[in-house]
Image: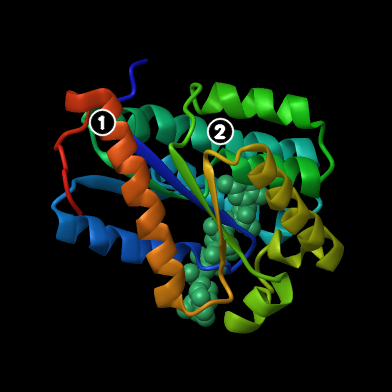
Amino acid sequence: MTKKGMLITFEGGEGAGKTTHAELFKNYLTQKGLSFFATREPGGTDFSEAVRALTKDMRFQDKSSLSELFLFEAARADIVEKRIIPALKEGKIVIMDRFYDSTTVYQSFGRGLNRADVENFNKAASQGLVPDLTIYLKVPQQDAFARKGGADKNDAIEQSGADFHERIRKGFDILAKENPDRFLVVDSTLPIAEVFKQITTAFEQKYNEKNSKKGKNCEREFTKF
Ligand code: T5A
């Protein structure tokens, strides 16, 4: 598939600020006159939102890790095919609140599933898409939980314990080190405006790089932000 748009993903632990910054980023793109499609994982289609509810449901907290993996991949396969690939083909900037890096981190580093297996399923469900830019919002888990008023008692993953969340932090750190061209690591303990400034600076650089390489592939050419 020839990818024409741009794929920007927001990643990090629970309550790291992904939704906050994805919302700000949407406003920013609107102001710049760039068209976008914003969504979240798991979610974004009726089916994937139903799967999302299942992944969080405390009644199924004891489900096997492999079952959990397949739930996330099932949700992903649906939104990738129905929403993300079409939006990219239209030249849109796709903003995702989590994508497959979350699966590598949560289901492999967190739950202990074999990483190569998880990555193969990620690749299949995402049809080989790779984000142009992944914004990793980094914050100690206890600080993030404090900001959102504690871990959600009705969320099976948030209730997975401190050791689990520490493995998540380490996992994202490892992925960021392995993918320095794609990952922007931002200290999300900084004030929101400062964090957001780093995000837009990195985006503008990527956008201009991509435009200068691909010329007409993007829906609009920008010489100046
Ligand atoms: N999951 C997901 C997997 O296990 N495998 C997968 O493959 C995928 C895709 C999804 C869950 O599923 C798991 C991971 C998750 O457990 P989710 O709702 O997407 O659930 O994930 P959460 O991290 O739980 O989402 P939240 O909405 O709770 O957190 P956000 O979006 O990261 O944080 P946000 O923006 O809501 O901010 C939280 C609070 O912090 C404040 C905000 O105002 C807000 O009050 N805040 C700041 N305060 C001070 N300074 C800053 N810089 C701040 N930034 C934000």
Check the picture and name the quadrant holding the N terminus: top left
Task: Name which residue lies at 58% across and 39% down.
Answer: 100
Q: Mark 2 points at which residue?
A: 74
Vertical arrangement, residue 26 with respect to residue 151, above or below: above
**Helix or strand or loop: what does disc 1 sit on?**
helix
Q: What element carries label 2?
A: helix
Residues at marks 1 and 2, CA–CA distance in whole angstroms: 36 Å
Q: Position of residue 114 (x, y in %)?
A: 82, 31
What is the quadrant of residue 27 in the picture?
bottom left
Q: Which residue shows up at 33% across the image and 66% down it?
A: 24
Tag of residue 95? none
Question: Residue at (53%, 38%) from the top-left corner?
Answer: 181
222 up-or-down from 12: above or below: above
Q: Which amino acid does label 2 sit on?
A: Ala
- Point out residue 4 in the picture as x, y percentages from the top left corner: 28, 26
Q: Which of 129 and 132 is in front in this view?
A: 132
Q: How packed is label 2: few (under 14 Cα within 10 Å), some, or many (20 or more)?
A: some
What number of labels is visible? Answer: 2
Instruction: Look at the image and tell me whether residue 61 can be seen.
Output: no
According to the picture, the residue beneath numbered tag 1 turns out to be: 212
Q: In terms of depth relative to the viewer, which is nearer, 20 or 125? A: 20
Q: Residue 7 at x, y = what percent? A: 39, 39
Label 1 vs 2, first from the N-terminus: 2
